[in-house]
Amino acid sequence: TDSHRPFRVMAKGGSVEALGTQFVVNVSGDEVTTSVQESAVSVTAPSGQDVRVMPGQMVSYSGVEMGRVEIADAEVETAWRNGQLIFSDKPLKSVVADVNRYRHGRLQIVGSGLENLSVSGVFDIKNPDGILEAIVRTLPVQAVEVTPLLVVLIPRDIFQKTS
């Protein structure tokens, strides 16, 4: 690498600087997550707080706050390279953000309490509607097609009558 021109990824007011490495930067909503497969990276939050991330580790920042460095699951973090999305107890709001990258149109969550429902599974990137079907089948949500380009996820029991 050229030390006078380091490789930097700028994301949501922060930055990730490569230190001769392999890494993944994932922006989902306001959260930026960096996972490192080889060598190391320096991650700087918008606040200026920085941390060095080593192989097998990951860190996230959101707004001005830097999260803790955690152990990364390389298979999960790089599954998209093999045409898969792997979720392990991931909040529905994060899953929807990931699915929206691969789906024609947009999924949107409407209703309180749905965003933090937990999703786990291995899914085919080429079949984002299959991911939507699995979510509807396994979580207390229903999908309503507002237009061909907008599907909203709402609580399954929203239209049930109360006595």
Image (cartoon, rainbow, N blue to C red):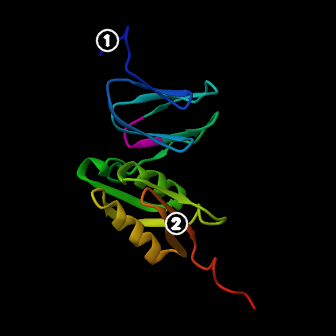
Report the magenta residues as a range: 54-58
Magenta stretch, main secondary structure class: loop
The kind of residue on which mark 2 rests is: Ser
Q: Is residue 133 magenta?
A: no
Q: Nearer the viewer, mark 1 or mark 2?
A: 2
Residue 54 versus residue 126 in the image, above or below: above
Q: Taking 15 as reference, is 3 left or right? A: left
x then y, percent, for residue 74 = 34, 48
Residue 20 versus residue 116 in the image, above or below: above
The kind of residue on which mark 1 rests is: Asp
Residue at numbered disc 2: 118
x then y, percent, for residue 67 = 58, 41
At 46% across and 57% down in the image, what residue appears? 95
Q: Which mark is residue 83?
A: none
Q: Foreground residue, 70 or 16?
A: 16
Residue at numbered disc 1: 2
Residue 151 seen from this side:
yes
SS for callout 1: loop
